[in-house]
Amino acid sequence: MKSSYKIAVISGIPIELHISFIILFGFVVFFSILSGNFGTAVYILMIFTLVVLHELSHSFVARKFGVKINKVVLLPIGGVANMGEIPRDARKEFLIAIAGPLLNFGFALLSGIAILIMGIQREVLPFFTMQLTSPADLIVVFFKINLILGLFNLFIPALPMDGGRVFRSLLAFRMGFTRATMLASEIAKALAIFMALFGFFMPNIWLIIIAFFVYMGAVQEAEFASLSALLSGVRVRDIMSYPVVTVSPDLTLEEFYDFVFKHRYHGYPVVEDGTVIGVVSFTDLAKVPRSEWNNLTVRDIMSHHVITINPWESAFKAMKKMSEHGISRLIVTENGEMIGVISKTDLIRIIELQRLIE
Ligand code: ZN
């Protein structure tokens, strides 16, 4: 089942709604129509339009630095811009991270000026009241939402939130990316625990959920930074396996079992007429009951998902590619020709070796 659905494409960037968001929003709209009060629906619609614009603001700056933007996904807890690797460059990361909150502060400033000029008399505090009875309320709500979004994203210095990225990039100017990430991640974890406790006593369930995501994000950032440091300077060609042991698609599974036994690799590229048409592993074989092994061939169980990498790419890139696609093996190709295979095992071996040396 698809987990998110595309609703629009803005300047080449697909905007998707996550299924959980659609369900939640559906409920809100349903109940606000039922109670004859459209205010809540309008309020939530405005929040998420602004969240999309916020993520697009990050995305446009990132794209200026050559980062590939895959999509923007809306979740009930906010938006996520799914993008390629952000350059490990303090200045670029700073500008990408600050672009979102700056847009919100810009909107807040403009609507704040409009409120003053039009002489709208509304209580700006408390923040979370939403009276939508006249068009003038709309501009006050717009002002409040932008102020909250800007402040919330920028002034919680916890990775992976914007404030955390700004904080990390500022640290990175002084101590290098890896150390900055480690420090920022520790602070983020502490803040997440604090945020969760705060959410527990308020009580505010969103705060607890966001705290959970911040904590997990911080752990992941630190892990990536440490792996990236351990793998730095290592290229795919340094650790790939070659010559490559390939398998024919016409082998029966019984024959394939003997083949695995003889060569003792876990996975193999499937080659037909000189081209790689798939990848097959011992795990694929183990999923098929033994009674079927004489009736099926490698072609029936192989994965058609062949992901390749250039031998001159970094080993870290190979690791990211594997985790992005949820696979444990990449085919190394140069000028369209297969010259090796790199597997998770190859990467883990190098990481363990580097850890020992450290
Ligand atoms: Zn942001």
Image (cartoon, helix red, strand yellow):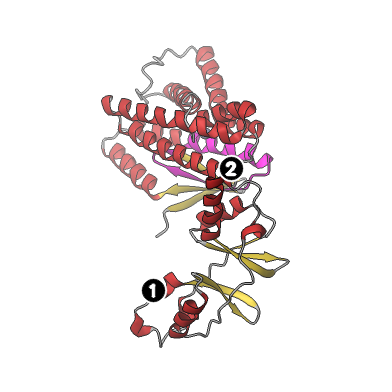
Which quadrant does the N terminus fall into? Answer: bottom left
Query: Please, which residue is most extreme toward the right here?
Result: 335
Q: Residue at x 29, y 35 (%)?
A: 36
- Residue 89's quadrant in the figure? top right
192 or 57: which is nearer to us? 192
Task: Give the percent coordinates (x, y) of residue 12.
Answer: 62, 49
| Residue 229, disc | 2
Q: Callout 2 environment at 10 Å: few (<14), some (14 to 19), or many (20+)?
A: some
Q: Residue furthest front?
A: 357
Q: CA distance from mark 2 to mark 1?
A: 36 Å
Magenta region: 49-78
> Looking at the rendered structure, which numbered label has been put on residue 286?
1
Q: Position of residue 79 (x, y in %)?
A: 47, 40
Name the secondary structure under disc 2: helix
The residue at 28%/29% (across/down) is 200
Above or below, 197 against 263 in this view is: above
The answer to whether residue 38 is visible is no
Residue 152: x and y in percent read: 45, 26
Give whichever of 232, 283 is nearer the camera.
232
Which percent across, then down, holds residue 283?
42, 70
Along the line of sight, the residue nearer the viewer: 98 or 141:
98
In this view, the residue farthest toward the bottom is 294
Task: Classify residue 25 by image quadrant.
Answer: top left
Amino acid at dot 1: Ala
Q: Residue at x 28, y 24 (%)?
A: 202
What amino acid type is highlighted by mark number 2?
Answer: Ala
- Ranked by sequence position, the earlier of labels 2 and 1 is 2
